[in-house]
Image: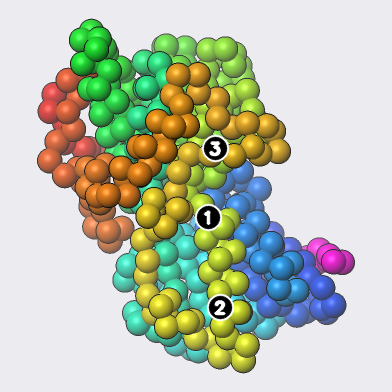
Amino acid sequence: MKKKLVSLLALGLFTAGVTGCNKTSNSLDIAMISDVGTIDDGGFNQYTWEGVKKVGEALNKSTGYIVPKEDSDDERKASIDGMLKRGAKAVVLTGYKFNTMVSDYAKKNPKVAWFLIDGSASTAENLKNVYSVEFKEQEAGYLAGYAVVKDGYTNLAFLGGMAVPAVERFGFGYLSGICDAAEELAKATPTTQIKVKYGYTGDFGPSESNQSNAKSWYNSGVQAIFSCGGAICKSVETAATSVGEDKAKIIGVDVNQHPQKPNLYITSAEKKVEKTTYDAIKLYFDNNKDLTGEWPTAQAGKHEILGSVQGKIGLPTEADSAGDPWTFKNFTKEQYNTLYNKLKTSDKYTKVISNNDGKTVIDGVLNNDHVQISFESVGQSVDNKPALKNA
């Protein structure tokens, strides 16, 4: 397939690209508009774009992306308008910042299919040309927290971006998994004690401040940081490298980040954004040859919450471009599979409750008899805290 990269700066947008086959530079089938992140952030936006590109290649459709030039609704709308002018038949929007505008655009453009990934339950509004999904990030966070404790790590941290529901779900699930694993270990070793630092940077980008905070945590004895905030992983990677890969490790987020720095990443709390995007867009084009804008009945105007039951969250277990991402020495894949199957049996297994339109909470309290949790102010205060047995 011949690919083209075409600048869209003439539209007043910051970054854009188009790939396609037998298309003019002005035509477009599938468009993606990112949130505040970039399509090379090594996480959510990049792998959503990978899903768009791959489905375009599979269906022989032209694909394009736009990164709004600033974090504002005006720029997000300008980005959408730019893609509609290019004739986009399906539009992929990444993140909750598009929640307030999806319905209006869908009503005004009924023959365009709209897919909101990481959206809100209130955005679909039963419009047949809108399909939105979010993920049970708490399940992925739980798996990561449980696994690292079972593998022998005793000094951990969570460095989130902004305290939005998806980040909170990752974080609360992470703490829940840590507490459960520590409680199990304490049955054999009563002296088990795990330390956890927990904080939000207040942004989703790399910065000297984020790097400094991560380095300070590593120097204080933290063995691994769950970096949960898009491109802030770049700051954590730099901090870990400066401290030394033998002392400083990272837990990735959203996607398998092991290929980025194989010697730094223990594992990643994945939500399968690439596969989810690919599957959704392929489903639309396969079932709507006339391009009426309407999704199949099961998706039309619907909002889905995807997790372990659908196989859309997890830790990476298969070999990637950098080798085997399963770096655990004590926690086995068999133990992981057993735990994964348990997650499928109960929505409350992780103890985290969130519908993305309200406050993320813990169902009851976390038993942290063997876990010392310290909430840190490293950019944004931790105002919404999970209920702890020992606060």
Q: Residue 2 magenta-drawn?
A: yes
State the SS at label 3.
Answer: loop
Decide: few, some or many residues near mark 1? Use Cα within 10 Å; few <14, some 14-19, many ≥20: many
Tell me the number on the disc at residue 273.
Answer: 1
**Amino acid type of the residue tagged 1 in the rendering:** Val
Q: Which residue bears the numbered disc 2?
A: 284
Q: Is residue 266 above or below residue 70?
A: above
| N-terminal-most mark, 2 or 1 | 1
Decide: few, some or many residues near mark 3? Use Cα within 10 Å; few <14, some 14-19, many ≥20: some
**Amino acid type of the residue tagged 3 in the rendering:** Thr
Magenta stretch bounds: 1-8
Q: Nearer the viewer, residue 38 or 328?
A: 328
State the SS at label 2.
Answer: helix
Q: Quadrant of residue 376?
A: top left
Q: Which residue bears the numbered disc 3?
A: 317
Q: Quadrant of residue 96?
A: bottom left
Quarter of the N terminus within the rendering? bottom right
**What residue is rendered at 29% in x and 39% in y?**
172
Q: Are marks 1 and 3 in contact (CB under 8 Å)?
A: no
Q: Position of residue 120 (x, y in %)?
A: 36, 65
Question: Main structural element of the magenta stretch: helix, strand or loop?
Answer: loop
Q: Nearer the viewer, mark 1 or mark 3?
A: 3
- 209 sits to left or right of 238: left
Quarter of the C terminus within the rendering? top left
Query: What is the total number of numbered labels drawn onto the structure image?
Result: 3
State the SS at label 1.
Answer: helix
Q: Position of residue 318 (x, y in %)?
A: 59, 39
**Mark-to-mark CA distance, 2 and 1:** 17 Å
The reply to whether residue 9 is visible in this rendering is no
